[in-house]
């Protein structure tokens, strides 16, 4: 290699290293600036809210926002239009704990918060905020997850777990939206599995962060007979193998025994040191809630969820999920009442 060639290589390497440093610094500056701007908006909203609260005249609150926003916009630009100032007020009202806001502002943009502000419950806001951070959702994906009701579906799934299974909360959904598979009205289980594998990236996104695909049609030899698990995943957050069975019909009680067998085999032959016991997810076209409740699936580490191959219109989706959550909570209340009655009878 000539001296000229050696010089060119060394200079190219230096420029590459310096470019990396510059790009990382620019990204850091952008994150710091975004965080500072978001916190500024929170303080602006809080200060105006306090001013209105301290003044007893109702008309004053209406006038002060218009007047102040007009002056701020003239002085500092379109970030402070009346519409944006009202968003800042809502922001500080919805996220009142500054100690919660600070770490969120370091990792989320103002655009993320604009998507969160219209949500009705604090729990939903915090769910989407945390998942945006954990799963690196941009504002577009955050809005997509909100429109697909990820929080509501996680709430429904959470009702299947007992109080001591907190590590599993917000890991699963019910139902799972598999509209991206573009399946027609009639299909077989192997068609469903094949479609999932073809759209594996989208399927993992629907499952959530932490899921890693391991095998399809996992072979298990038990008493000389071959058994095949549809899909095997590993969840890094849970440190568990996750067995997934696909059922294109209604859930049947026999599905529990099948999954129990698979989980015990995986626990004996596949679980590695440091991992927790495998868990199962049975995906059905339609679930039988009462059967699932009576079988107490959660005690055996089995989750049952429906999958929908078409996304309903927004109003129908909201109504359906709302009804499912009400029914799930009613079942929990009935079970608690039943357990309380048994405890009272035992005391007698």
Image (cartoon, helix red, strand yellow):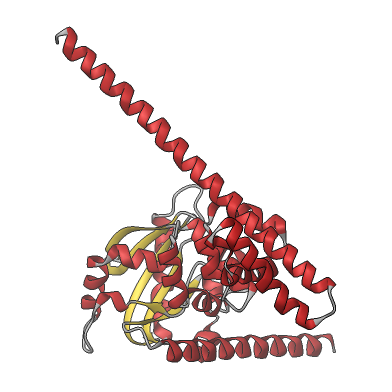
Which residue is located at x 58 percent, y 90 percent?
326
Q: Nearer the viewer, residue 260 or 221?
A: 260
The quarter of the image holding the N terminus is top left
- Vertical placement of residue 99 versus 140, above or below: above
Visible residue check, residue 293 = yes
Left or right of 140 in this view: 98: right
Visible residue check, residue 238 = no
Left or right of 199 in this view: 110: right
Which residue is located at x 72 percent, y 89 percent?
337
List the single residue furthest toward the left. 1
Quadrant in which residue 76 is drawn: bottom right
Which residue is located at x 70 percent, y 90 percent?
338
- Vertical placement of residue 21 versus 84, above or below: above
The quarter of the image holding the C terminus is bottom right
Q: Locate residue 170, reporting x and y percent.
A: 54, 68
Left or right of 264 in this view: 82: right
Which residue is located at x 44 percent, y 69 percent?
280
Q: Locate residue 249, reporting x and y percent.
A: 32, 88
């Amino acid at each position: 290699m000539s001296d000229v060639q050696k010089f060119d290589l060394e200079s190219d390497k230096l420029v590459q290293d310096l470019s990396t440093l510059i790009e990382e610094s620019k990204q850091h500056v952008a994150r710091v600036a975004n965080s500072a701007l978001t916190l500024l908006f929170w303080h602006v909203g809080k200060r105006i809210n306090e001013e209105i609260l301290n003044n007893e005249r109702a008309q004053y609150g209406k006038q002060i926002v218009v007047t102040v926003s007009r002056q701020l916009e003239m002085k500092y630009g379109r970030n402070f239009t009346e519409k944006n100032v009202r968003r800042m007020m809502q922001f500080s009202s919805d996220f009142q704990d500054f100690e919660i806001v600070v770490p969120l502002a370091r990792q989320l943009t103002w655009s993320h918060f604009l998507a969160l502000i219209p949500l009705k419950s604090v729990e939903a806001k915090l769910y989407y905020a945390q998942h945006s951070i954990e799963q690196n959702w941009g504002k577009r994906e955050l809005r997509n997850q909100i429109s697909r009701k990820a929080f509501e579906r996680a709430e429904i799934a959470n009702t299947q777990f007992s109080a001591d299974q907190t590590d599993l909360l917000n890991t699963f959904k019910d139902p799972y939206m598999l509209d991206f598979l573009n399946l027609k009205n009639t299909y077989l289980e192997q068609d469903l599995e094949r479609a999932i594998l073809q759209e594996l990236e989208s399927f993992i996104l629907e499952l959530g962060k932490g899921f890693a695909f391991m095998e399809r049609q996992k072979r298990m030899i038990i008493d000389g007979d071959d058994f095949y698990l549809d899909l095997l995943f590993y969840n890094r957050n849970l440190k568990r193998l996750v067995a997934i069975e696909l059922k294109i019909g209604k859930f049947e009680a026999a599905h529990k025994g099948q999954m129990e067998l698979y989980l015990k085999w995986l626990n004996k032959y596949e679980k590695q040191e440091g991992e927790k016991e495998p868990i199962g997810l049975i995906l059905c076209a339609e679930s039988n809630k009462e059967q699932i409740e009576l079988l107490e699936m959660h005690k055996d580490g089995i989750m049952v969820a429906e999958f929908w191959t078409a996304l309903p219109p927004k109003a129908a989706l909201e109504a359906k999920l709302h009804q499912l959550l009400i029914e799930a909570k009613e079942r929990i209340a009935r079970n608690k009442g039943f357990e309380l009655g048994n405890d009272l009878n035992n005391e007698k």
